[in-house]
Amino acid sequence: MIPATSFDAQPSDWRRAYRDLVTDPHELLALLGLESLAGRLPAAGHAFPLRVPRGFVARMRPGDPEDPLLRQVLPLDAEYRPQPGFDLDAVGDLASREAPGVLHKYQGRALLIATGSCAIHCRYCFRRHFPYSEELAARDGWAPALAALRADPSIDEVLLSGGDPLALSTAKLAQLTAALSDLPQLRRLRLHTRLPVVLPERVDCELLDWLATLPWPVAMVLHANHAQEIDTRVAEACAALRRSGVQLLNQAVLLRGVNDSVEAQAGLSERLFEAGVLPYYLHQLDRVAGAAHFEVGDDEARSLIEQLRRRLPGYLLPRLVREVAGEPYKSPM
Ligand SMILES: *Cc1c(COP(=O)(O)O)cnc(C)c1O
Ligand code: SF4
């Protein structure tokens, strides 16, 4: 059992860690003894700069240029070479905007872009080109977003996404859920967040208290791509989340050089389960500009899942899906 004392952390602790991210690629390389990679960094001054919490860096293997965690965050020169077929709005988000910050693509579920901020910048992220500044649900208060939800009685699940919704203060989240509790049709709340994995300090007593008192069943979809991301501190944060009544799921993205092997995928599923998290989706990469070097072909992806199916219990097999603009669900492959 995990001692409760590890969760007496004060909200100021995560704020401090969130402010003290590594943002200089040269510092990151120096921390890992990989100064020799400096020649592969892009020229300075580009959009979507490096951002990574120090605790996540501590889980990387020093001296290993192929480290699966490093590869997810290190900006490379190669990203900035245009690749045919890799576009700016790969998943059609701009077409499914219902109100500022509200995306309604699937029946019954509306996604709220609660904030554009993330503690980490994942190089493969499909939101790296999304015009966040115009799309924050919070920008004019929550009123327009809430009005859009209220006007559609078919929506019974709200997904808080971003960016990372847990980048908001718990007080701000509580304001939002207080407003949502006026909507009689809501039956579930879902959060899509990478913070408990990349900055487990975020799971403090204030957050846990808020989660435990919400009026709906809560699902939290974490985002870990490799077993090495889930150290003891992250597993403790997951245990605490579960104790507050949250159903924990994980989505990963299939990434060349990160988790494109049976070993890596099986290791991730097994480690997630040890931490009380069930695998949900394994996403085929969205073809966004800058992410081409992460792509795994569809045939290889299917063969990987086939081998995993032999190896793992059914409940540890993630669903391999791809997001196709205009489809009514994430398309199974
Ligand atoms: C992925 C996504 C959802 C959730 O889809 P599920 O299959 O229920 O996980 C909802 N809305 C949008 C806009 C999404 O991109
Ligand atoms: S945390 Fe999520 S939204 Fe933020 S950069 Fe990473 S993948 Fe994208």
Image (cartoon, grey):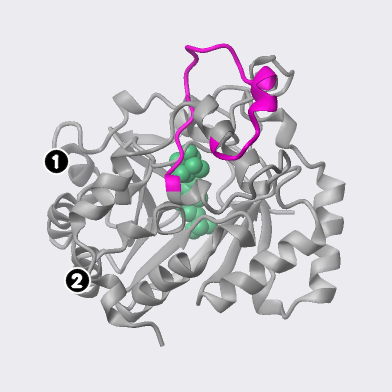
What residue does disc 2 label?
A: 209
Would you say the beta carbon of the disc 1 residue lies within 8 angstroms of ligand 1?
no
Is the residue marked by circle 1 packed among few (<14), some (14-19), or many (20+) residues within 10 Å?
A: some
Q: Nearer the viewer, residue 111 or 20?
A: 20
**Badge number at residue 315:** none
Q: Amino acid at mark 1?
A: Ala
Q: Nearer the viewer, residue 302 or 186?
A: 302
Q: Relative to 119, is 48 above or below?
A: above
Q: Quadrant of residue 281?
A: bottom right
Q: Amino acid at mark 2?
A: Asp
Is the residue marked by circle 2 packed among few (<14), some (14-19), or many (20+) residues within 10 Å?
A: few
At x 75%, y 44%, the residue is 257
- Of tags 2 and 1, which is closer to the observer? 2
Total marks placed: 2
Q: Quadrant of residue 234?
A: bottom left
**Badge number at residue 143:** 1
Element carrying mark 1: helix
On the rendered structure, is 212 left or right of 178? Answer: right
At x 71%, y 38%, the residue is 65
Do tag 2 and tag 1 residues touch (Cβ < 8 Å)? no
Element carrying mark 2: helix
On the rendered structure, is 172 left or right of 202? Answer: left
Range drawn in magenta: 31-54
Q: CA distance from mark 2 to mark 1?
A: 25 Å
On the rendered structure, is 109 left or right of 300? Answer: left
Whole-percent x and y of residue 268? 65, 65
Whole-percent x and y of residue 14? 28, 52
At x 41%, y 76%, the residue is 239
Whole-percent x and y of residue 191? 37, 57
